[in-house]
Amino acid sequence: MYTRLTSPLVRDAGELRTASWDEALDRAAAGFRKALGDGAQVGVFSCSKATNELNFAAQKLSRVALGSNNIDSCNRT
Amino acid sequence: MLGAGGGTSSYQEVREVADVIVLWGSNAREAHPIWFHHALKAVHRGARLIVVDPRRSASAQWADLWLGLDVGTDIALANAVGREIIHAGLANEEFIGRATTGYDAYRESVEKWTLEEAERVTGVPADAIRELAHAYATAEHAQLCWTLGITEHHNAVDNVFALIDLALLTGHVGRYGSGLQPLRGQNNVQGGGDMGALPNKLPGFADVEDDAARARYEQAWGANIPSERGLHLSGMFEAMAHGELTALYVIGENPAQSEADQTRATELLGGLDHLVVQDIFLTKTAELADVVLPAAATWCEAEGTVTSSERRIQRVRKALDPPGEARDDIEIVYALAQRLGHDLGSTRAEDVWNELRSLSAAHAGMSYARLEELGGIQWPCPDETHPGSRFLHGRLWEPVVETRAPFMAVDDEPPVDALDDDFPIRLTTGRRLESFNTGVQSGGFRSPLHRNGSALRLAPEDGARYGVSDGGRARVVSRRGAVEAGVVYDMTLRPGLAFMNLHFPDEVATNVLTIDATDPKSGTAEFKATAIRVEAV
């Protein structure tokens, strides 16, 4: 049985703990910056249950902010 | 093949016009219940429903004719249908000559698929194949519809080609009442692709490798877009395996349980340097993440639009605020972009939509106000006076067809996971009416409908043969792993065919068994064909 997520979480010493939005978004961005800085590839899985607008936003983030066409969703069927 | 990534026809055509509806590799009665309501209305007014499915599924039980082919023999069957149409003189020669290319090569390629040969390979009686061929070819209006039974194979794209060939052979495409429909399995599978959440397509169907097209988006966004297509989902897993892709952003998906060969998928996700998951629940994928971002349930906590299998864009309206600190998904995505140094613009759904309209000619005429007024609009809708398009490819019926539709000659290729003495049973997977995918949203309520939900379904003959009883338990073993599951005898299965679903992965992890052999063009894994053995426990 799943219950709704109501707070951002970040991993510390192997465990997920609650965090502020600022901390979570900073951590999320830092990880992508590091991967791109290391010359690694990054990817985005978008969501076929969400709206057109969200899917548009996700591909724009991938192409513009991450500089990557590695974006997909479960529409390969 | 026809040049647009969407179903060619409308539900209205199924419901009101088609004489023959062929449902191939789809159990729509359970997996696409809304679409099936339209089909049932058609049956009620006298249309013939023909179902092609290895199982005598709930959909097949409504059909006039059921063709219970062996898993993975769709091309053999389709080519035999094509050959029979040609030999019976039922091909639409006028349409073929005017609107298609490659007919001679197609005709040669299907010539070996006599009814008898197809019966030998597919297990479907020759008479039933002939009946399908004649019913489809002689119908005034026919709809050919398919889903994952066609596409969750290592040769998915060839399977689709084999079906489209039948529409070209008979002219059942491009006019009101006749068409081709790939039924979409979630509320916005169609729209996700239309919006450019694809490695090779920009929003509005532009090819990312088309320099002129890409330049338009680069100018609009003030950014450089990579000129080569990216990796699809399966390709990203490959790149993770090679250590080339190290950071991943997952929005509203649960690949740790939805991917084929789940053990491998979970290892790869767990091995990433950086995994960010945005979801409404702490899924098994989110449990592996470095950062979890709490999102809105977009069907009731966000404004926006979704696109159905008939290309209809419909509004979604916000009724509730997301709980606690959970946020609107677009706000989250754009806040992350901001921290990466890019301002992507307004997060208001209508502003995002209007930006899409400025880039995609097919959506240009669909303001929120018009979507409201008309109760949804089908793309393409190029301007604000356009009513939207009920069906596609009417151009094929113009006196002079500028861009003809090519026949694609394809041949039978058996599933990758071969049957042998150690793995003698063919396992196929699918959906149940009351459940949704990995059960994150549908597994949490108690219901008699969930009874035996996670069970392995077996033909009674196989149960007796392998010593597992109805209501007992069994160990199910594939070349990739093993799970234990309850057993239910199922009269809709023939000996040698077993069925499981993926809805209760915390009880029975079906995708531990499945193979991640994928179609090189579509990237879709062969969920529908696993070789297993069954052991008593």
Image (cartoon, coloured by chain):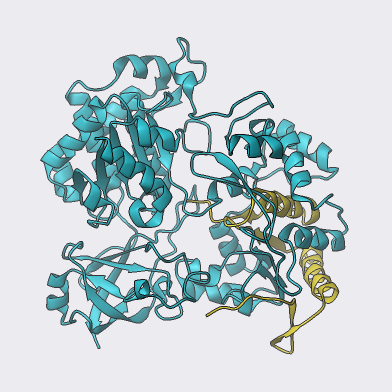
| Residue drawn at the location 39% of the way across and 49% of the way down | B147
Q: Image height check: is B534 above or below B170? A: below
Snapshot quadrant of residue B253? bottom right
| Residue drawn at the location 54% of the way across and 56% of the way down | A74
| Residue drawn at the location 51% of the way across and 20% of the way down | B403
**Figure chain in yellow:** A
Pick the residue in front: B81 or B59.
Answer: B59
Q: Is residue B24 visible?
A: yes
Residue B364 image offset from top left, x and y in percent: 69, 32
Q: Image height check: is A18 above or below B91? A: below
Residue B112 image offset from top left, x and y in percent: 20, 35
Residue A30 image offset from top left, x and y in percent: 82, 70
Total number of numbered discs in the rendering = 0
**Figure chain in cyan:** B
Q: Is residue B164 visible?
A: no
Snapshot quadrant of residue B167? top left
Q: Image height check: is A42 above or below B409? A: below
